[in-house]
Image (cartoon, rainbow, N blue to C red):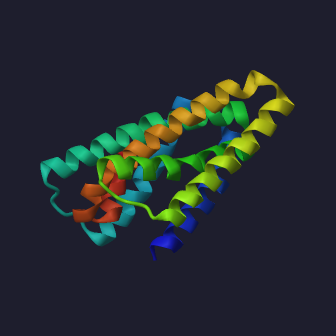
Amino acid sequence: VGIAAALASAACWALGSILFKKLGDQLSPIALTFAKGVVGSVFLAIALGSSGFRVIEPPELMMLTLSGLLGIAIGDTLFFKALANLGAHAIVVLLTLGQVFTLLLAVVWLGERPGAIEWLGIAFVVSGVTLVLWVRLSENGSSQLVGVAWGLAAVVCMAVSTIVAKEALAVTDSIQAAFIRML
């Protein structure tokens, strides 16, 4: 189920990147983040209405709030800035580094220990992203370097956000957690 959810999430990010790129031509990154937050909150509230709201302890509420501020408010805004500079293809490739940063943070803060195959996978992902972005920057000049910087900042915010939310997600319904983070 987790793998299927991760693949569905990746597909949604890819499709969303294309749609947000078109909207980004008309709206600022902050306006896009706000609009996404409002629409997302409404849909999550509807979903939460059917599953029911449960009491959340203050530490978990604080972790989810901090996670939402880092990953959604700041991270998504930086993502939209990067998208405006790089385009959908390059930003989706760059976001692949999010899983790498998240894993590295999980090693440092959560004590998780990847095996040799996972480390090899990390090396392949980092090499692939570096190669794609290197080719893109060499073709389009360094003008897109700012977009890469915004994208990397977004990836770091999203990775930290994921690690911050992990413990709260262990004791909180995922729809309710997403709703709190989106708010």
- At 44% from the left and 58% from the top, the residue drawn is 43
Q: Quadrant of the C terminus?
A: top left
Residue at coordinates 46% horizontally, 77% vertically from top-left?
Answer: 1
Q: Nearer the viewer, residue 124 or 31?
A: 124
Where is residue 15? Give x, y as percent: 66, 56
Q: Nearer the viewer, residue 141 or 73?
A: 141
| Residue drawn at x 34%, y 44% as measured from the top left | 67
Say above or below: 150 vs 6: above
Residue 50's place in the image compared with 141, above or below, is below
Q: How many marks?
A: 0
The answer to whether residue 162 is visible is yes
- Taking 170 as reference, is 2 left or right? right
**Location of residue 151 (image quadrant):** top right
Left or right of residue 123: residue 40: left
Residue 56 spot, x, y in % from top left: 17, 56
Residue 123 appears left or right of 58: right
User: x, y (%) of residue 20?
Assistant: 64, 44
| Residue at the farthest bottom position | 1
Camera-nearest residue between 172 and 129: 129
Identity of the residue furthest to the right in this view: 139
Residue 180 in sight here = no
Q: Position of residue 136 (x, y in %)?
A: 79, 37
